[in-house]
Image: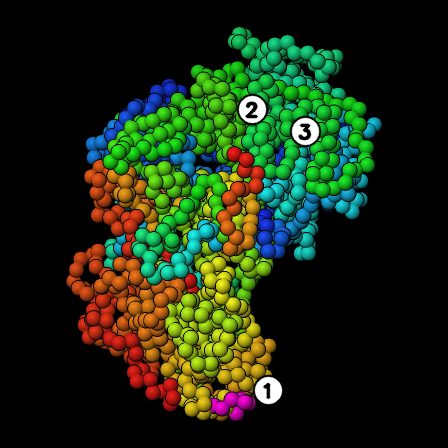
Amino acid sequence: MLLIRCPYCEEERPELEFRNAGEAHIARSANIAAESDDDFEKFFFIRANPKGVIYERWRHIHGCARFFNAVRDTVTDKFVMTYKAGEPKPEKLPGASK
Amino acid sequence: MNAAFRIPGAGRLSQAKTASFSFDDKSYTGIEGDTLASALLANGVHLVGRSFKYHRPRGFLSAGAEEPNALVQIVRDDARKTPNVRATVQELYDGLTANSQNRWPSLAFDVGAVNDIASPLFSAGFYYKTFMWPKSAWKNLYEPKIRAAAGLGVSPDKPDPDHYAARYAHCEVLVLGGGAAGIAAALAAAETGARVILADEQAEFGGSLRFESGAKIDGENGYSWAQAAVAKLKAMDNVRVLSRTTAFGYYAQNFVGLVERVSDHLKSPGRELARERLWQVRARRVVIATGAIERHMVFANNDRPGVMLASAARTYLNHFGVAVGRNVGVYTANDSAYAAAIDLKKAGVNVAAIVDLRDNPSGPVIDEARALGIEINFGRAVVSAGGKLRVSSMTVQPKNGGGERTIPVDAILMSAGWTPSVHLFSQSRGKVAFNDETKRFVPGTYAQDCVSVGACNGTDGLSATVDEAYAAGAKAAKDAGAKTGKGIKPKVDASESWSRGMLGAAPGAGPGTTVKAFVDFQNDVTAKDIRQAVHEGMRSIEHVKRFTTNGMATDQGKTSNMHGLAIAAEELGKPIPQVGLTTFRAPYTPVTFGSIVGHARGALFDPTRRTATHGWAASHGAVFEDVGQWKRAWYFPKAGEDMHAAVDRECVTVRKTAGLFDASTLGKIEVVGPDAAKFMELLYTNPWEKLEPGRCRYGIMLREDGFIYDDGVVGRLAPDRFHVTTTTGGAPRVMHHMEDYLQTEFPHLNVWLTSITEQWAVIAVQGPKSRDIIAPLVEGIDMSDEALPHMSVREGRICGVPTRLFRMSFTGERGFEVNVPADYGEAVWEALWAEGQKHGAAAYGTETMHVLRAEKGYIIVGQDTDGTVTPNDAGLDWAVGKKKTDFVGIRGLARPDLVAKGRKQLVGLKTKDPKVVLEEGAQIVADPKQAIPMKMIGHVTSSYWSENCGRSIALALVAGGRDRMGETLYVPMPNGTIEVEVTGMVFVDEKGERLNG
Amino acid sequence: MKKYSVFAIAREAMRGHKGWEEQWTSPEPKKEYDVIIVGAGGHGLATAYYLASEHGITNIAVLEKGWLGGGNTGRNTTIIRSNYLYDESAGIYDHALKLWDGLSQELNYNVMYSARGVMMLAHNVHDVQVLKRHVHANRLNGIDNEWLTPEQAKEFCPPLNISKDARYPVMGAALQRRGGTARHDAVAWGYARGASARGVHIIQNCEVTGIKRAANGAVSGVETTRGFIGAKKVGVVAAGHSSVIMNMAGVRMPLESYPLQALVSEPVKPVVPCVVMSNTVHAYISQSDKGELVIGAGTDQYVSYSQTGGLHILQHTLDAICEMFPIFTRMKMLRSWGGIVDVTPDRSPILAKTPVPGLYVNCGWGTGGFKATPGSGHVFAHTIAKDDPHPINAPFTLERFRTGRLIDEAAAAAVAH
């Protein structure tokens, strides 16, 4: 069971309090009705599914109920960081010197 | 009465406290503190089991959790029969009953042992190469035979009356293993004031100090020091000491699962005590001090009862006061077995000979053994053990060949060296490294905040172990944020020390030999099986393991893995690290399902949700159905009524007078805020901006892909306040879905969402008399059709309590849904029921609700839709706002396949024979004469007998259904084809006049 | 290839089993092959086998980063059934089931396919509706699947708890008698042996690190940890790693990879005579030939390639098992492990050509790929050989997510109202 830091509660809590909500930073178009079939497919179905660093969404569903973003390594399952929804994708990850 | 092999003055048990027990229906006497193994050995019993494949007689290999052979069934009573219990771990209690397993008719004479004679046929993987002809014989003949022969013990056949407990715990330092290393680490950590948990699998702490007679710490005998140190730890407020507790799994982020065996060692545990307790511990730092496990020597017939690990024999003597024989032989490749020989010799047991593979070893233990007059043979090998049900001799030969000599013995104590227990380290995802000099895998790269100390870290010698462990314990506490401790490191005054040994087959069992030299005892894997696997092309150690089943028995290879690896490496001509190590998987030792499950059994398997009127319904004879976690009243049979009769009556009564129905389980969400209407516009297909406060609308929610996700009636209470209802099952996911969009896609909207499902009880009153029933109880709401038309909502009071009163209908009749605070739900129901009685109203359940709504063609999401249905498919296009430029699902709906012709559409079906009720889920075809596989064009989604219509009715999804009105279609059933006519979906009151009737 | 038989065993028994030949060879990779299969799991090996045995293409390399059969093939709970709802699914899974029956003889390798019956339990009215829909659809598709009352279910599986007092009482069951289990390792090994004997190169410990494309965009070969290997046709059969491999060719996939755990108990004498599955209580169980109870757990909720998962997942699973079988609380978990399952949005696989000429993909089997192994390999071999899908796998395209023509087996079991 993972230990996840909620950026709103500013606490590490067990995974049982959270629900994963899929890949992060996939914005819904403001004019979605005008999107092409290809763009809609990319938006709704295509996923990065990376082996390594993933940007993903979690919800502290049995806590503050807020959605937030996390950076995690999908090979080790270790979290690099978490940050609030709406904040930009971090350009540089803590500890990533390379 | 003293058992024959109990040595007076030896061991630590009080001989006064006897315990009687039985094994295979024969009675014996042991001593409190014994394990079943030590008690049987004290009585001279070595033969306790039969092996998996060859049914070879087996005795005790070990004195601990690594035991592969001595598995027995423990019987407390008819319902508490536990298979595959290691006799070396099971503590004795007075009255214990144990039976041997996997033998017939008896342990000493087992018919299955014919497999041993035929064993050349049963080589590694033989079953992949045969049993294929004739084809049907695998299922009918071979497999049943193989299955009957396989398996060890017998599963319990009655529900378990015992219960299992569970605890969560947090600590700064978790110490796994309570030998010298673990205790020293725990002391150092505890002295800092940090929260410490120390756990050990044994009943007593001390680990190898239980048998290491030469250890001295702080001036005391090692074992006594351990007891004193643990007593000191137990007395500290910041320390929790858990004995009989096995750390079985090391999960992500220092999350460790442990099982505490609470009462399996007690004569009468009583009902209060759990059998076991699961501890789930989250630790800042973990100190792994799990020691090492001795390996056996791989030689011919090394599995005969009486052939055991040297450290086991020492444990039986030094801790339990039991001699494992009267005339023992010793076979070793390192120093540790000498200590066993010396201890036994000093206790009066004859040591026939020590056979040492090494050419010219030297050291104090060798000198001491020699001084005691024990015959020592260097550079020699035991090439075979004699005897069948018990070892009777050992055949010794110079290791490079030469003359044989057979020495009579009644036990052989062996040691090929020690394997560090890196299981938990490896489970933590740390990477082990092979030390080529000592030929062992030790912790290499760490993946989590943990540290290994002592023998499991490859540290040899008590002094070095205690130094390392004490420092590690202090550092772990410090790293976890504790202050520096003020304790004093324990001082090791005397210790035993050895390392090295050998891996793989011993002389006489090497390449080219065909003897049965066991590597994995339980699974009957021999050295030659491993070579054969390599010979057949298995180059990965995982292939070797799976092909031979080496290391896959209940001991999970604790004694066999390293030998197997070495033999495979030798055969492949590769260094051991290149062949690789199999993965260590949880659990470290087997754990009961019960301990994992804990309290989540029976009624507590899943929470049960009951509505406010549950008690009333139960006392009025309701039959309940499970809907998600809810218990819902299904129907209310009167005396003599079956479900059919009850539902018919309920259905007719609702349309004739009125009915009361508990609709509380429907999800309810309050959408509030200045942008509430905008939010509703985005989340539902319908338009909302123009809905007047006080009015209601049926809303449809889609997923982004355009398929129907949920539906429900929504009331607008005020310009900025919507009372949304959802399906019963959909409530949590709809809330999640809404929050997702509000928080992440539309955060600019000023809206709050609140789940109010459990806040309001909902009582549906439906039928022509519904207003007459409700009106007398309502205050502050004009109930006239003009003031409260169909699809409207008012706030007021009923029975003196607040209500949100909806005028709405899921039956097609004039109807109301009375929302009241849940605490008043039952009282208001009672009041409505009393009014209803005056009009002859009935209480009705979910089945009647289903029938009545089907008569009106109202859909149920999840029954008439299945996640591939669009609003248009369901005939609900009218509910999609045509002028809207955005809502969730708008783009998905426009995909090519969702607008294509020929999609399945929801229609009504009438059977040509009105008495025939279709089966829900039945498939529909256009041409009943076609051969199988048939072209199916749809299926029946809802189907009922409608007493109101005097016939059956059904809804179905049919390809191009709306263009097929009046067409005859067919429902082929196993006992004949049913003709149906495609109709509209409304079977009662097509004009909808009854809504105001 | 020397034939396996009881006579061969007897012969070998006389000479200490020294005459067995290698089940598959371990050659050095050549510079170029006609076809490269990425991934030596059951599906990849079966693909190579059928390319060789049915399409006469033998100049094939199967590249495996670890050891053959070491991924999901060697980690699953070996359930075989074909009682799927939609025609497309029923088509491919029943194609596989027909091949299972006779696979031991075809491969001359006992894969221990055991038609012990797969029973799926209904615990509420909604389950009954869904399972009956399956039963009816299957019947008209010529696939056996029959409805059982709770009492009949218990007769078929005596340890099952059908008490009305259970938290979720059994209301009935759908039984596919042809369903059952097989020995997972033997499937990989049998196909490997058969393919190797026909000249296929199985190259283990050879990780693909890149996919090369020629100037015209078509595939020209793969970069590996053992150097470049050329081929005009590359079939990717990499299960949990499909996204990673396909990305190398610039194709982004509608896939997510999740940890899936399973466990076995200590071996006991026969007690569970069939496979029992429950979607509502959420667990499935069978008993292996060795006597271990084989139990499937759910997926963890997050994308991961770690091949491990949380203890709470196993807990939920064992809760469910002990709910269905209260007699098992004293049984012990012997071993647990994790695999990586690649899941598509509609829970159906992708077996198709890709936008890149010469590149083919077989993935997205989620938690249910083992049962399809022979059928999947068979039609994927056809797809590669003919550069055109077999009618059976034609619906399982990559494009269906764009068009909306999904094969949504998960949605068909929509949650209860």
Distance, label 3 to label 2, CA atoms, is 17 Å
Which is more toward the observer, B413 or B480? B480
Residue B781 is a magenta residue = yes
- Disc 2, SS: strand
Return the x and y of residue C50 as percentages of the image width and height.
Answer: 25, 36
**Does residue B297 lie above or below B828 as drawn?**
above
Return the x and y of residue A30 as percentages of the image width and height.
Answer: 40, 60
Disc on res. B434: 2
Q: Viewed as shown, does residue B558 lie left or right of B534?
A: right
Q: Chain of mark 1?
A: B
The crowd level at tag 1 (other Cα within 10 Å; few <14, some 14-19, many 20+) is few
- Looking at numbered disc 3 in the image, what kind of residue is underneath it? Gly
- Disc 1, SS: loop
Q: Quadrant of the rendered structure where residue B879 is?
A: bottom left
Q: Chain of mark 2?
A: B
Residue occupied by mark 3: B454
